[in-house]
């Protein structure tokens, strides 16, 4: 089977990935072997490949938005059928015993492990996943539409919860890629008014098509004060205009796993009147299931740009350069 491996983390303008021919992995007793049908290309993959995130597994295979069908299962696995379509997401293991797991915050587990960072992911023809972390998928979507839901959608949903948008409130979204275009639709379905701040003209056009009340430049002021905001762009300098745009008591959620340095804040200008900043760390399996159930009952428009598996470098380069709106997906 074919799989990509990170040979040496470095700029995607080079060639930090190598396509290899290997034997299919064998599932452990508690794992599923999944034949990959589609794998989303997430900005976190770019951070792994370029070295923004510390190496956890040398020569890892990236990819954690995996849609596939069960090819086989370990001896301890029950409840899954060969040929069943399942999803593999970012969160791959938690201890189940620490104080975070005990209070339903397994996303903060200090023993957590992640697909495409700690273990090989979906830039491949086959992948494994612990059965307890495999996700059931909603009907009515193609493989390439489902793939972005498995991180872009899930983490956007978690960020929306962290932003605490009041019922019928005003939400600002900074950056409008794979995650943001799904999160906006969830917020709109919940009766929110959404304003989008992003750098690309195509992304602004997509935002308006999906129902955003306005779309402007990345650091521009929205046309009204925001009750909440989510920063999806990995640009720390946008924290300041996002905080300035918040109304009193507003919350800014930072949705990325990596962010460039944030400039110095001015207390009166950026934080006074009980404005607050919250980070976002992964998600729980419960939140993943909640979001996928929502996607099953509310048809989401998924903007997917499809690349062959052999085009992983192209997909990551286009993502880094902002050459498409929505999400990129690899298909074997």
Image (cartoon, grey):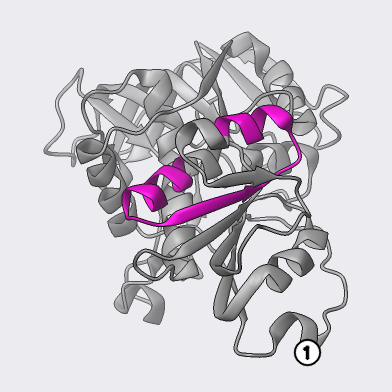
Vertical relation: 245 (above or below) 209: below
Residue 134 spot, x, y in % from top left = 30, 40
Residue shown at 42% from the left, 20% from the top: 144
Q: Is residue 75 left or right of residue 319?
A: left
Q: Secondary structure at mark 1?
A: helix
Q: Which residue is mark 1?
A: 268
Vertical relation: 296 (above or below) 163: above
What is the count of numbered marks? Answer: 1
Residue shown at 63% from the left, 9% from the top: 310
Boundaries of the magenta span: 182-206
* Most foreground residue, 164 or 134: 164
Residue 150 spot, x, y in % from top left = 41, 39
Q: Is residue 283 left or right of residue 54?
A: left
* Most foreground residue, 108 or 242: 242
Q: Give the farthest residue toward the front.
A: 223
Vertical relation: 83 (above or below) 228: above
Residue shown at 28% from the left, 30% from the top: 86
Vertical relation: 228 (above or below) 294: below
Residue shown at 47% from the left, 34% from the top: 210
Residue 19 spot, x, y in % from top left = 67, 15
Q: Is residue 303 visible?
A: yes
Assess whether residue 202 is covered by the magenta stretch.
Answer: yes
Residue 98 spot, x, y in % from top left = 38, 77
* Most foreground residue, 193 or 39: 193
Judge the density around disc 1: few (<14), some (14-19), many (≥20) Cα neighbours within 10 Å: few
Q: Is residue 131 visible?
A: no
Quarter of the figure with residue 326: top right
Quarter of the figure with residue 320: top right
* Most foreground residue, 27 or 98: 98
Q: Give the farthest residue toward the left.
A: 79
Assess whether residue 282 is covered by the magenta stretch.
Answer: no
């Amino acid at each position: 089977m074919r799989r990509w491996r990170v040979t040496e983390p470095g700029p995607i303008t080079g060639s930090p990935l190598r396509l290899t021919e290997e034997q299919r992995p064998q599932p452990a007793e508690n794992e599923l072997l999944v034949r990959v049908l589609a794998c989303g290309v997430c900005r976190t993959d770019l951070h792994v490949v370029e070295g923004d995130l510390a190496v956890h597994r040398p020569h890892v295979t990236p990819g954690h938005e995996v849609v596939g069908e069960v090819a086989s299962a370990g001896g301890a696995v029950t409840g899954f059928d060969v040929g069943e379509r399942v999803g593999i997401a970012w969160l791959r293991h938690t201890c189940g015993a620490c104080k975070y797991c005990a209070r339903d915050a397994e996303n903060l587990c200090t023993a957590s492990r992640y697909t495409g960072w700690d273990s090989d992911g979906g830039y491949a023809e086959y992948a494994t996943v612990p059965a307890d972390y495999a996700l059931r998928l909603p009907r009515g979507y193609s493989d390439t539409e489902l793939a972005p839901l498995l991180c872009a959608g899930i983490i956007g949903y978690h960020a929306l919860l962290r932003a605490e948008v009041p019922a019928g409130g005003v939400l600002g979204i900074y950056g409008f890629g794979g995650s943001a275009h799904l999160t906006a639709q969830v917020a709109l379905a919940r009766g929110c008014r959404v304003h989008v701040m992003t750098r690309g003209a195509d992304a602004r056009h997509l935002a308006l098509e999906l129902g955003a009340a306005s779309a402007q430049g990345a650091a521009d002021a929205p046309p009204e004060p925001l009750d909440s905001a989510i920063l999806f762009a990995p640009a720390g300098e946008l924290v300041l205009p996002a905080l300035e745009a918040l109304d009193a008591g507003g919350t800014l959620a930072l949705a990325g796993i990596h962010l460039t340095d944030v400039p110095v804040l001015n207390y009166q200008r950026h934080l006074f009147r009980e404005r607050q900043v919250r980070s976002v760390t992964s998600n729980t399996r419960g939140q993943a299931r909640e979001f996928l159930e929502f996607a099953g009952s509310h048809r989401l428009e998924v903007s997917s740009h499809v690349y062959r598996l052999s085009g992983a470098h192209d997909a990551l380069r286009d993502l880094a350069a902002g050459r498409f709106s929505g999400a990129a997906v690899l298909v074997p």
